[in-house]
Image (cartoon, rainbow, N blue to C red):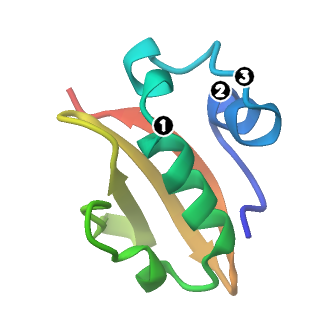
Amino acid sequence: MIKAFRHKGLSALFSTGSARKVQPKHAKRPHLTLTLTALSAATQARQMAVPGMRFHPQHGGRYAAWVDESCRVTFRFEGEHAYEVRYEDYH
């Protein structure tokens, strides 16, 4: 379950479906919403390692799931919950 978002746009997208604060090209495709839904259902980070997510660990106990060329959803797990869920552009 997602316990805390660090990006208000992702929080709004997940809770209300409002895509105002995410890139329009990501709002049009279902990948970002599917990633958040999978993260909400996950109880361990490794459950995000499914085809198409391009899941990978990062430094400091954080993980990332691919959105597009340079954007990722990043997060950390504490117990069975995801925290600090962010929407990041690597470039």
Cα–Cα span, label 1 and label 2: 8 Å
**Disc 2 marks which residue?**
9
Tell us which disc is closer to us: 1 or 3. 3
Residue 52: image location, x then y, percent: 26, 61
Residue 60: image location, x then y, percent: 39, 68
65, above or below 71, in the image: below
In the rendered structure, find residue 70 and report the number of the disc placed on it: none
Residue type (three-letter) at the residue carrying disc 1: Tyr
Q: Nearer the viewer, residue 82 or 25?
A: 25
Q: Nearer the viewer, residue 7 or 20?
A: 20
- Give neighbour class at mark 1: few <14, some 14-19, many 20+ (Cα, 10 Å): many
Tell us which disc is closer to us: 2 or 3. 3
Identify the residue shown where x is 58% and y is 74%.
77
Q: Nearer the viewer, residue 32 or 8?
A: 32
Residue type (three-letter) at the residue carrying disc 2: Gly
**Disc 3 marks which residue?**
18
Identify the residue shown where x is 49% and y is 54%.
35
